[in-house]
Amino acid sequence: MTPTAPHEAWTSSLALKILAGTAVLGLLYLGRGVLVPITLAAMLGFVLAPLVKKIRGLGLGQASAAMLALIVAGLAAAGVAMAILVQLGTMSDSMPRYEAHVQAKIATLREATLGRLAEAQGRAGRLIGNLAPAADPDHGADTPQADGAPSSLLLRFVSSIWAPLGTTGVVLLVLIFVLLEQDSLRDRLIRLTGGQDVRAATSAFNDAGQRLSRYFASQFSVNLGVGLVIGLLLAAIGVPQAAVWATLAGLLRFIPYVGFPAAAVCAGAFAAAVVPGWELMGATLMVYLVVELVVAHVVEPQLYGHTTGLSPFSVVVAAIFWGALWGPVGLLLSTPLTLCLVVAGRHVPALAFLDILFGDTPALTLSQRFYQRCISGDSVEILADARAFLKRKSLAAYCDKIVMPAFELAAVDLELGLISDEQRLMGQQVIARTFSELAHEPRRSRGTRVAVLDAPNLGMALRQGRMQTEGRWQGRLDVPAGSVTLCISMAGDQAQLTTELLVRVMRAEHLDARHVTIAELADPPDEARPETVGSVFVVGTAMDQAVSTDNQLLNEVLAAMPQARIVLMLPALQRQAPADPITADLAHRTAYSFEEALALIGNERR
């Protein structure tokens, strides 16, 4: 196989996927006359399925339960329609009383808009000369008048409602058969999509059904609550027939983005016709605006985020896509259809990209996000994620679950030579800035800020940043006995980085922890007293980096502090076999994580 063969195969596969996607889009658009009623009926079947199931629980068969559910739904819809018609009749009777108000407001608006435009046009005409020919006064005199014959009006009315009635009839017919053959259709779809893997197909269908049912129930509850609240508020401010506008708001809110504003405009226009002034219209529009803001930004994010599994981005994109493809019906069904696609992406490997694009599951783990933001130089998002994590858990857990796994990802890429020097330096600067912010270290000017390049490695750069604030010995030396936790780093960059993180974890728990390298043990400060050390953490290194003279020096220092509790910490970053530098005659414990190290300290203190 030539080197270009894999690339050509990938290009061919991509071209086939693009052609298949184009064919599907063409089928959805050209077949919308058939697909829209079927999809509407299927979604209504999902809505009525729980009701049919409850009725069947009473002992009735599938056919009887389906027909009874349809009758109940039809009676409920007819009841709502009759209530609206009664209110509309009352409104129609009172409209003549509002005619003067409407005419006055139309005249005001015309004067404020068309009148100003006509005045501006007249001034412009006087400035540049009116070169347009005079209008023919007889033009339009022979325009044929609309035929007002009753037969023509009846024909026009029937033709206008024929298409909606036909679509409604198709939807109702398909819905009846969907409910009657509910079990059989589900079995056929499972066999068609799942093949021999009945379990996986059943899981997918159950997941889709549960999510759709929760979504429809949640949306119905929210819209019902919105209608009730708006009805009460409109009645309180004095809008007549408030029940009509509340019902209209609840119904139109099922249409994303455009339905509720349309209901607000209708209610505002009616309020403007009721009274002479504009105050009632302003109050009405304010009611709609406040209710929508509260529901959209407080109620729905908490409710829909747990019921649909869709990201906010996918909801917007779905509304645009399905609205452009199927018009108002597509806009109405955009969220349920996209939800079905996301469920398919979670259960069908070939469609996994749909779940990644439109689902609410994080595309990257927190450790992957940390790594990606590091090599991108984005400390702002890392700090935001860290602060959100630290509100729930400790810094030790943050280092164990996020920072160290991210360092392991970086170590693998470094070994493969996939990280450039620029990315490595950028990542080290981001990490240094992040931990400085988390430790609330004072900000320094650009001239005094510690650069990563000034230290031999990242661990020592972090330590140097602390030492500029805390002093050379990272605190006072005249401290009570047993109050210092000494953290000793053996040779190697990874050991020094782990030791510095360990010090910061200890300090977050209000422990006097200090980072000392193995080389610094040979030259301790004159004021240092061994009895001030209560615990010693030795961060080991890889076997190939262990130095015998370092081990000898370490054991001599540990032997001089018999009162200290000794813990050996083996860093997770070590990709080779770790070395144990502590001799067998010195009793010590072993920790494999920051949380375990804190637990050992806590047990000793208790």
Image: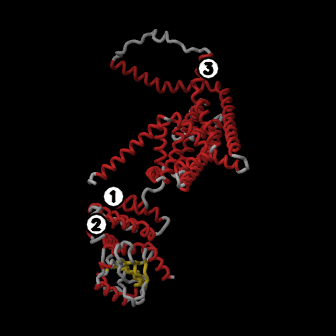
Few, some or many C-alpha atoms within 10 Å of disc 2 (few <14, some 14-19, many ≥20)? some
Numbered disc in front, either 2 or 3: 3
Q: Residue at x 60, y 44 (%)?
A: 223
Q: Is residue 384 above or below residue 137?
A: below
- Quadrant in the picture for residue 494: bottom left
Q: Quadrant of the N terminus?
A: bottom left
Residue with the mark numbered 2: 451
Numbered disc in front, either 1 or 3: 3
Residue with the mark numbered 1: 376
Q: Residue at x 34, y 63 (%)?
A: 430
Numbered disc in front, either 1 or 2: 1
The answer to which of marks 1 and 2 sits earlier in the sequence is 1
Q: Amino acid at mark 1?
A: Ser
- Observer able to see residue 514: yes
- Observer able to see residue 469: no
Most foreground residue, 229 or 194: 194
SS under mark 3 = helix
Q: Is residue 8 above or below residue 122?
A: below
- Quadrant in the picture for residue 273: top right
Q: Amino acid at mark 2?
A: Ala
Callout 1–callout 2 Cβ contact below 8 Å: no
Q: Is residue 133 above or below residue 223?
A: above
SS under mark 2 = loop
Residue with the mark numbered 3: 154
Q: Residue at x 42, y 43 (%)?
A: 21
